Amino acid sequence: MLSIDASIQEAPKKLYVAYKLAQNIVCMQLYQKAVTLYLKLDPKDISIPPNGRDVTSIGHFGTGNLELTITNEAEFQSVKPLIQLAYQKMGG
């Protein structure tokens, strides 16, 4: 995520890590067997991938309405375009 733009800042919090410009773009929670990303995207505007879900009405740590659970490198590669889209929507 830091490789998208040099101006993206990594902000570690107690329960997650935020990646932000002026506002959070992506929040990441680490688990033993998975990484969960919360992207600041409106799930109604995109096609939600199989490893994603709309968490607009569900409480969670961090910022973002699209949750993506990543368990391997292939899943990460498949969500990279969504990370890029979240960055672009934040003005990047």
Image (tube, rainbow, N blue to C red):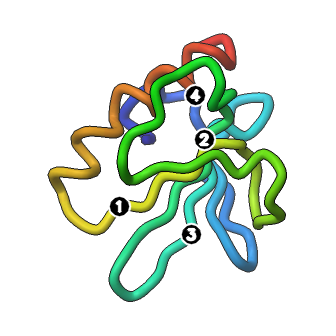
Q: Judging from the image, what secondary structure is the residue with disc 2 in?
A: strand
Q: Look at the picture and state if 24 lies above or below 81.
A: below
Amino acid bearing label 3? Gln
Alpha carbons under labels 3 and 2: distance apart: 12 Å
Q: Judging from the image, what secondary structure is the residue with disc 1 in?
A: strand
Residue on which the image places disc 2 = 39
- Graded by Cα atoms within 10 Å as few (under 14), some (14 to 19) or many (20 or more), the crowding at tag 2 reads many
Quadrant assignment, res 87: top right
Which of disc 1 and disc 3 is earlier in sequence? 3
Residue 43: image location, x then y, percent: 63, 31
Residue 2: image location, x then y, percent: 44, 40
Amino acid bearing label 1? Ile
Amino acid bearing label 4? Ser
Residue 92: image location, x then y, percent: 58, 14
Q: In the image as oriented, which residue stretches furthest toward the bottom?
A: 32
Quadrant assignment, res 81: top left
Residue on which the image places disc 1 = 70
Quarter of the picture holding the N terminus = top left
